[in-house]
């Protein structure tokens, strides 16, 4: 495993770096991006993906907001590592440029996650791990039922043909 904030590789030793939904979760993304720039050879590329703004990602923001409302997870503080901390294009561009990257492009990529029902959503969220899975594992049966009922209510606008279609937006950056 490599610590992205202290990469133990020589300068200019890597042709490319691909990071899918990682930089947003790092305690110091600025340091991690600087280290990434340091190990990239001249002309090397970084391609990264982060999640767009919370309101554009109801597939996960609804559950996060609900867990916070139920006091099962603390409310996120501005600037803390988390799913949406790098959602703003200006912030992402600024971090890349301050790390020494030239930004080739930043673009939004729509996603659509489909679930048969709330149980399917819960199962998928538990399979992918993360905050929801940790909270679910430690929650009581009564809390499970409350969470599922609240999710069903909140997902109602996304009900299509008996299942749910929950949209999202990823932000992808290419830099060198």
Image (spheres, rainbow, N blue to C red):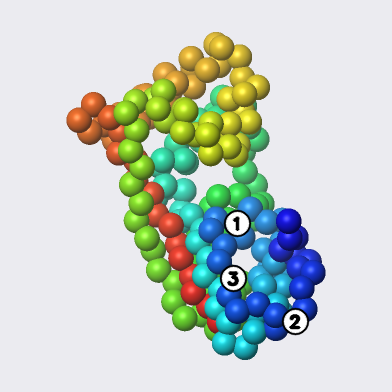
Instruction: Report the residue at 65% width, 77% height from top.
Output: 14
Instruction: Report the residue at 40% width, 42% height from top.
Output: 58
Residue receiving disc 3: 17
Image location (x, y in percent) of residue 87: 50, 59
The mark that comes first in sequence, 3 or 1, is 3
The mark that comes first in sequence, 3 or 2, is 2
Closer mark to the observer between disc 2 and disc 1: 2
Outermost residue, top side: 142
Image location (x, y in percent) of residue 145: 48, 14
Does residue 65 lie above or below 144 as drawn? below
Residue receiving disc 1: 22
Question: Looking at the image, can residue 90 be seen?
Answer: no
**Residue 11: image tag:** 2
Image location (x, y in percent) of residue 19: 57, 62
Outermost residue, left side: 161
Image location (x, y in percent) of residue 151: 42, 26
Tally of numbered discs: 3
């Amino acid at each position: 495993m490599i610590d992205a904030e202290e990469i133990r590789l020589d300068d200019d030793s890597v042709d490319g770096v691909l990071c899918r939904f990682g930089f947003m979760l790092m305690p110091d993304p600025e340091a991690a991006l600087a280290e990434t720039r340091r190990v990239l050879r001249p002309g090397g590329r970084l391609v990264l993906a982060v999640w767009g703004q919370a309101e554009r990602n109801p597939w996960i923001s609804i559950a996060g907001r609900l867990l916070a409302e139920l006091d099962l997870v603390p409310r996120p503080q501005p600037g803390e590592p988390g799913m949406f901390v790098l959602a703003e294009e200006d912030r992402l561009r600024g971090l890349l440029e301050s790390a020494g990257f030239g930004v080739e492009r930043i673009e939004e990529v729509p996603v659509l996650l489909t679930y048969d029902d709330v149980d399917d959503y819960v199962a998928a969220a538990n399979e992918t791990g993360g905050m929801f899975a940790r909270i679910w594992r430690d929650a009581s049966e009564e809390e499970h039922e409350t969470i599922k009922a609240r999710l069903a209510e909140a997902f109602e606008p996304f009900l299509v043909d008996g299942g749910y279609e929950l949209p999202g937006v990823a932000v992808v950056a290419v830099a060198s």
